[in-house]
Image (cartoon, rainbow, N blue to C red):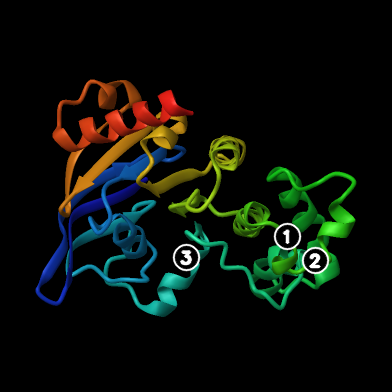
Amino acid sequence: MIEFEGLVKKFGERTVLKGIDLKISAGEIVFILGTSGTGKSVLLKTLVGLLRADAGRIRIGGIDVTDISEEDYLPIRRRCGMVFQHPALFDSLTVLENVAYGLMKHERLSLDQARPRAHECLEMVGLGGQDLESLETKLPTQISYGMQKRVSLARTVAVGPEVLLFDEPTTGLDPVTTKQINRLIQELSRKLKTTAIVVSHDMDCALEIADRIVVLDQGLIVAQGSVAEILRSTHPLVVDFLVEAKAREVTA
């Protein structure tokens, strides 16, 4: 379980998170929605210690990580795999080397030793098959942006995280690839039995695969619940998100 208790994060005079209370159960797929600048990505970064909270507590699997040292945070971070908004692949490394990177660094495997696991993860994200031998030798700049996203996801799951964190994972993708990535998030979370937290502004994605949707506005949780509960919400921001999602559905 992941717990945020009274979480506060400030940047100078601006308070971005204003006392967030949120519990996420093991194995849940939770979408955190909100407009730009409302603190969605900040919440993820406080979870893995990239940012430190100004008040409140954070617990991962019952361990209070709020004030632990950088050294003590390292094993906690290895339990959490983060997929950033952009693929963030190493341009100088091949696809295979990118996927194997965490295995080589943390588990001290050679590239040949890491190759079977890297192949397995590439197959998980739909990049296996007959073209795998050709794909694994390519550099990130030699494959499409959508494929880069998949490689990034393969790299993240290769080290076996217990928690998957996604920061706007479908940004910059066309509608077809967006749906494919959404299905991958759902399938991987179920298959690997991981907890998934997805930061997004896309209600369509949330309605399709989320177990629970949390809506942030001005640093506060203004609505949360199952898909059915969110569809019944009367909060103005939630209604706006739903109207926008419906409009996209009609024009699709």
Q: Earlier in the sequence, mark 1 or mark 3?
A: 3
Q: Which residue is mark 1?
A: 143
Q: Is residue 44 above or below residue 229?
A: below
Q: Position of residue 200 (x, y in %)?
A: 38, 47
* Apparent side of residue 163 relative to residue 139 in the rendered image (left or right): left
Frontmost residue, 133 versus 58 = 133
Q: Is residue 42 above or below residue 214?
A: below
- Closest to the camera, between mark 1 and mark 2, is 1
Dot 2: element: loop
Please, what is the three-letter code of the amino acid marked with disc 1? Ile
Q: Position of residue 131 (x, y in %)?
A: 87, 50
- Check whether the beta carbons of the residues at disc 2 and disc 3 lie within 8 A of each other: no
Q: Residue at x 72, y 65 (%)?
A: 100
Please, what is the three-letter code of the amino acid marked with disc 3? Arg
Give the quadrant of residue 142. bottom right
Q: How far is the residue under mark 1 from the one under mark 2?
A: 7 Å
Q: Earlier in the sequence, mark 2 or mark 3?
A: 3
Frontmost residue, 148 versus 110 = 148
* Tag shown at residue 14: none
Q: Which residue is mark 3?
A: 77
- Check whether the beta carbons of the residues at disc 1 and disc 2 lie within 8 A of each other: yes
Please, what is the three-letter code of the amino acid marked with disc 2? Lys
Q: Which residue is mark 2?
A: 138
Q: How far is the residue under mark 2 from the one under mark 3?
A: 29 Å
Which image quarter is the N terminus in? top left
Q: Alpha-carbon neighbours of circle 1 within 10 Å: few (<14), some, or many (≥20)?
A: few
* Apparent side of residue 234 relative to residue 3 in the rendered image (left or right): left
Frontmost residue, 9 versus 176 = 176
